[in-house]
Image (tube, grey):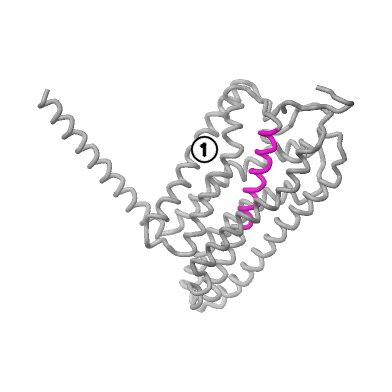
Amino acid sequence: MKLANKTIVTEFLLLGFSLSEETEFCLYVFISFIYVITITANMFIVIIIKSDRHLHKPMYFFIGGLSFLEIWYTSVTIPRLLWSLKTREKFISPGGCMAQFYFHFSLGATEIFLLTAMAYDRYVAICHPLRYLMIMSPKVCAVLITGSWLGGFSATLVPCLQISSLSFCDGNQIDHYYCDLGPLLSLSCSEKLSIEKLFFCLTLFIILGCFLLVILSYTCIIRTTMTIPTAHGKRKTFSTFASHLVVVLLFYGPIIFMFVRPRTGGLMHVNKKVSLIPSVVTPLLNPIIYTLRNQEVIRAMKKTAIKMNIFYRTGKCVYNQVTAKKNTQI
């Protein structure tokens, strides 16, 4: 619709991956399977950390917070992608598009801040072990978690408001499976240089700033680890931060490639594929990485599984007794 030489977009078209119907169905089944496992695994991590008192420690508090965040982060884009793959319905309203943009980038920024807080936690645990519980008190942990969420949702508020006020005159087709910045700006005929500069500066400050803090933390951690005299001590210390380091590399690698470089239209289709790593792959791998290398979490998982099995058997026994009693009365 055009009004006063401006185009009013009533809906956007998310092009997605533009595959054949058979290929899209296979992709739908594959991503659905990963999504269900991701949500289940992360919810299970949150439940066992909350229910097992042996895991009420700062490190597991942050792991539970990360798993809780991953549930929401992957749910911002993946259900909409699955709906599009199944029904081939690719339209999204401008309001829905802006909401998806805001929550996707806000949760992404929150994860960056949270991973930085987790790096600080590992730094204190290894470099200042005698003061660890005093420094990383429950109050400090709560402040770091809350600050990560507030910082993430505040950082993207201004760019989102600016984008929502743009006029769009170059069609409504977004070459992505979610509302990303580059494809949105390419459709606008308004002045957008200031938005690009603001968003680039924000991503540069958040991503590289936090990444440098993580690198600084691990430089101190590795330096302290190398001073441990025994090989067994070094391996034990390394095991306490190796999982977090792997998660950091998996998350930071794709987002640095996507955002910390000049924007060029030729690489938008590459961004679309690379973005599947932080949106689909990383939320699935995080609970696996943290559980496979952590004996305390594995023991807690076994205890939780035993409790659930006992609860199931007890409930089944009660149900059978009630059913038998009713049949006897009849």
Q: Is residue 211 above or below residue 179?
A: below
Which span is picked out in magenta?
95-113
Tell me the quarter of the picture where residue 192 sits. top right
The percent position of residue 164, horizontal first and vertical second, equals 75, 38
- Residue depicted at x 72% and y 26%: 11
In the rendered view, does 265 fall on the left or right side of 26? right
- Residue depicted at x 77% and y 27%: 9
Pick whichever, 320 or 259, lies toward us: 320
- Residue depicted at x 46% and y 57%: 293
Pick whichever, 110 or 147, lies toward us: 147
Query: On the rendered image, what quadrant is the C terminus found in?
Result: top left
Q: Is residue 245 above or below residue 167?
A: below
Is residue 297 within the magenta segment?
no
Q: Amino acid at mark 1?
A: Ile
- Report the number of numbered marks: 1
The percent position of residue 304, horizontal first and vertical second, equals 34, 51
Residue, disc 1: 34
The percent position of residue 120, horizontal first and vertical second, equals 59, 66
Query: Badge 1: how crowded within 10 Å, few (<14), some, or many (20+)?
Result: some
Kindly report the secondary structure that dominates the magenta region of the rendered protein: helix
- Residue depicted at x 53% and y 48%: 285
Query: On the rendered image, what quadrant is the N terminus found in?
Result: top right
